[in-house]
Image: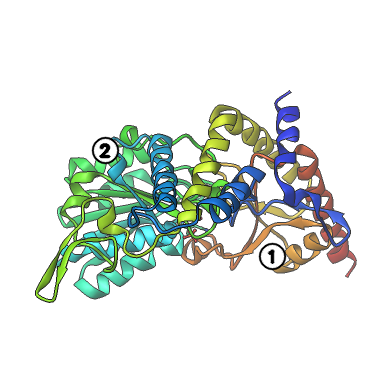
Amino acid sequence: ELAVVFARLRADFPIFERMVHGKPLVYLDNGATSQKPHCVIEAEAHYYARLNANVHRGVHRLSQEATDAYEGARDIVQRFVNAAQREEIVFVRGTTEAINLVANSYGVRFKPGDEILITGMEHHSNIVPWQLACERTGAVLRVAPVNDRGELIVEEFARLLGPRTRFVAVTHVSNALGTINPVRELVAMAHECGVPVLVDGAQAVPHIAVDVQALDCDFYAFSGHKLYGPTGIGVLYGKSALLDAMPPWQGGGDMIREVSFAGMTWNDLPYKFEAGTPNIAGAIGLGAAIRYLSDIGFDRVAAHERALLAYATEQAQTIPGLRMIGTARDKAAIVSFVLEDVHAHDVGTILDLEGVAVRTGHHCAMPLMARFGVPATVRASFALYNTQEEVDALFAALHKVREIFHHA
Ligand code: PMP
């Protein structure tokens, strides 16, 4: 009966009205970006059609309405992640920008020999900003390894957490494997050593109810577009005490209180970190996406996606020569695999002709691919609108791939 509910929700997403190569679209690339429901598209269109004005500036009516809508979206995000204060929600361009903000701003205090600890399953956007911070400051990057199932080896993480560790950055859910990390435990371990923790939540927020206070993380980053919201909008949550002590990263309008040629003073949180005209429409669209998801309820979304994951994992065993990469015990609705003797890109190309959209490649996690000795995998990642029939379509297409390469 859950499947029936979700099959009906599918009608909320206009993209499924279109065909691909004459076949119905089977969209299994949700880890890259999700599709958008009508309400999100309409929220953006409504802003441009009826409210369009700059925020935090005008005394005029439109500017006030636009500001109310933009700040209203901040309230929605605050409740969504259960932040203690609305000032702790900073709107940014996406996960990547959120992490760069912290690496640049918090990172000014890193000294030569300081250590930044990450894990072996990070997305490039939670590796490279720290490498750049290391280059600037002389800090050193340390990496906690993953086991053959694609799980973080927590004992190794604990061992690497030492007297020189100044910062920890970990992903909540691996985009390449689906592994869910025990973030709460990792945060507690880091805090024992007095070290703050940033969590990359890009792949977690669409699948798991996140409570930043329960996790006790210091920073939490995510993107709107993987959460049924627009591109170009994302969120950095940060504990106010930390954000308050950090210098601004970008300068411009809105982030200052007073400017003269002798100097300037910074604005309060969160505006200190929101230089320039923000993505007003995007924030409003993100608010609509969160409302949509919250109305359905995470319990139901998680149960539906868990059923799809279990079914896909079972079906994968029917394909000869399929090797699953990432078999974590705690896993989000992502399957990543390779087919013996067939390159992932060839698999992706044939699947596309069947209307099946998957991601093939290194998933911006090249060190993780190296860990498993593969250059690329095929990744199917599920969302609330996916169905069991679509999983069947994926595996029917994979059987076709096998046939083509078997007879070649
Ligand atoms: N971290 C993870 C785990 C991701 O999956 C992604 C997106 N693939 C990012 C960070 C980067 O997100 P964005 O490109 O939206 O900034």
Farthest front residue in view: 60
The residue at the point 65 percent across, 39 percent down is 384
Depth check, front residue: 158 or 86: 86
Instruction: Name the spot of residue 194 as percent of width and height, x first.
Output: 16, 45
Res. 110 visible in picture: no
For mark 1, give the secondary structure: helix
Residue 192 falls left or right of residue 390: left
Mark 1 vs ligand 1: CB under 8 Å?
no
Instruction: Name the spot of residue 388 as percent of width and height, x first.
Output: 76, 38
Is the residue 37 above or below the residue 261 in the image? Answer: above
In the rendering, which numbered label is found on residue 344? 1
The residue at the point 33 percent across, 57 percent down is 57
The residue beneath circle 2 is 188
Mark 1 is surrounded, within 10 Å at the Cα level, by few (under 14), some (14 to 19) or many (20 or more) other residues, namely many
Res. 265 visible in picture: yes
| Residue type highlighted by circle 2 | Ala
| Residue type highlighted by circle 1 | Ala
For mark 2, give the secondary structure: helix
The residue at the point 22 percent across, 51 percent down is 243
Work out whether mark 2 precedes mark 1 in sequence or the reverse, and give the earlier one.
2
Position of the C terminus by quadrant:
bottom right
